[in-house]
Image: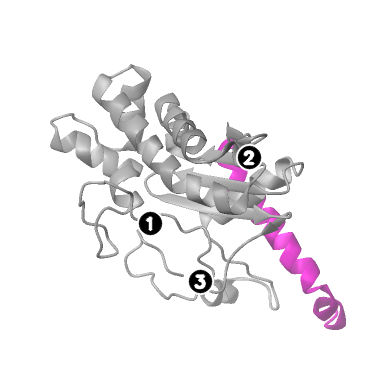
Amino acid sequence: TSPARMPGWNGADVAALARPHLPPGAVVVVDNDANLMALGEHASDPTAAHLLLVKAGSGIGCGMVVDGVLQRGARGFAGDISHVTVPDAEPVPCSCGRVGCLDAVASGAALAQRLREDGVPVDGVDAMLDLARDAHPQTTGLLREAGYRTGTVLATIVNLVNPDRLVLAGWLSQAEAFVAGVRSAVYAQSPPLVTDGLEVVVGRTGPRAGLIGAGRSALDAVFADLPRLVAAGR
């Protein structure tokens, strides 16, 4: 694993840690939440063969499905948009050691921190979303700005991948201002040939997306390993 927000877990072999607690020969699959959510959304409606999912919560991640297949890249980091530098962003330090990363300026944790620095009493993303539902002007403005910045990063991926559907998931997708900001940036910064027919939607499976994707990923792994399991009499 290589988690940005889980100190002490970098490089941990989660599968090896889990195996002693499972039946002998059990297949263990480990993946990140954005990838599994992308699989879950695709499984719920496979009509979109090319799908991007951005998970915007306390952090920001992205999963990519191309021709119905989840893309992981050479080392498993495909879709990791959290440390893409946002154009013209303020030089906010990021956990990666750089400044101006998307995660540092547009994630739920970053927005809540900005509100606290400005004297708005929020103790987390949930409280921030409550303020947005009450049309708190400063919160609404920050969420729209964060959505636009996220959409600016996503527009480059949309131009490269040319997906059928861009799915917004995670806590921030509950905020209309954030969703509007993403849509505005993507449609403004991607050419009509790419955006024609592109759906920019909030995820249909909600908090179940990751569970559905995990189930699909596990089944795929089991069936891929079926010859060995049959040969072993399991």
Q: Secondary structure at mark 1?
A: loop
Q: Position of residue 218 (x, y in %)?
A: 69, 62
Q: Is residue 211 visible?
A: no
Q: Along the line of sight, which residue is nearer the eye, 14 or 167?
A: 167
Q: Position of residue 60 (x, y in %)?
A: 42, 49
Amino acid type, mark 1: Val
Q: Marks 1 and 3: in contact by CB < 8 Å?
A: no
Left or right side of 103 for 51: right
Amino acid type, mark 3: Val
Does the magenta-highlighted stretch encompass residue 79? no
Left or right side of 173 for 44: right
Q: Is residue 170 visible?
A: yes
Closest to the camera, between mark 1 and mark 2, is 2
The residue indicated by pointer 3 is: 14
Q: Is residue 190 above or below residue 84?
A: above
Q: Which residues are magenta?
A: 205-233
